Amino acid sequence: MPLPKDLDPYANPRAFYGAELRRLREAAGLSQNDLGERVFCSGTYIGLFEAGERRPQEEISRALDEVLGSGEHLQRLCRLARTSKVAGYFADAAELQLQASFIGSFTSMLVMGLLQTESYARALTRSAHPFAGQDVIEGHVRTRMERASLLDSPTAPVLWLVMHEAALLVPVGGNAVMGEQLNHLAEQTASRPGLITQVLPFSAGAYPLLHASMTLMQFTDAPAVVYTESAYSGQLIEEPVLVAQHSSAYDLARAAALSPEASLDRIASAAKEFLTP
């Protein structure tokens, strides 16, 4: 995938990284496939870096500098290009969500970040950072709320949520906050054609994603990836075999979940229970 002719290399650090990588590669007389083979990735992946469609990776940048004889040039640019307002371990996944045509999410205990209310997000952030100052907490909350604008984009992906029934019952922030969150989830699901929500009931028993929180992202012109996350860390998975394994587990969870209509009824019922004095 060559660098688009109309891509401004000075538009942002990631575009500049891509332009410099292409310049160095062409000066070395290497095709994207040739360079990919030397740093143990595909030529398509090199093309995504050059087009500014993927955030550069530090390990690959180090290998590229070695192959291209560019000292630490790409490594330094990589550090600039990876600057992000979200947690470092989530930054790559956050960028990919903006490019995805389909996002499939499974959560076992929480509502997915893109569908969280401000009060719910604040309660979660405070629980994860009990010793942080209020300005830090509010910064995290603002960033999470800003990310929700993805759903209003003309190129918004199809978003298919599968959440365990337990996520409807944990009183994050108290009854009022939880009731508001569940009503918001139901309203968003009912009003957005590209949003599907399913609840995996307790009666489903054991299932492959019992201990996991995962996001599957599919693209029109790139291989699918999976992002898994725990409280203070996350992992972006691109190995095709592992992506396929996670995708199959996600499909099984969808098959075992309540129908979208029954799921909306269950969400509304849980919200009513939280808001009833």
Image (tube, rainbow, N blue to C red):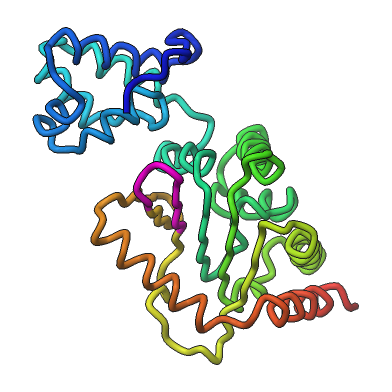
Q: In the picture shown, does residue 34 fall above or below 72?
A: below
- Relative placement, left or right, of 177 versus 112 is right
Residue 114, percent from left and from top: 63, 50
Up-down relation of residue 249 to residue 13 (above or below): below
The answer to whether residue 19 is seen in the rendering is yes
Q: Is residue 157 magenta?
A: no
In which quadrant of the rendered view does residue 245 lie? bottom left
Q: Is residue 164 above or below residue 136?
A: below
| Point 46% across, 8% down: residue | 10
Q: Quadrant of residue 142?
A: top right
Q: Residue 94's x, y, as percent?
A: 50, 41
Q: Where does the image place residue 97, in percent across and percent down from the top left?
A: 51, 44
On the question of residue 137 being in view, the answer is no
Residue shown at 40% from the left, 53% from the top: 227
Q: Nearer the viewer, residue 128 or 45?
A: 45
Residue 260 vs 222, above or below: the answer is below
Highlighted range, magenta: 215-225
Q: Is residue 171 left or right of residue 232?
A: right
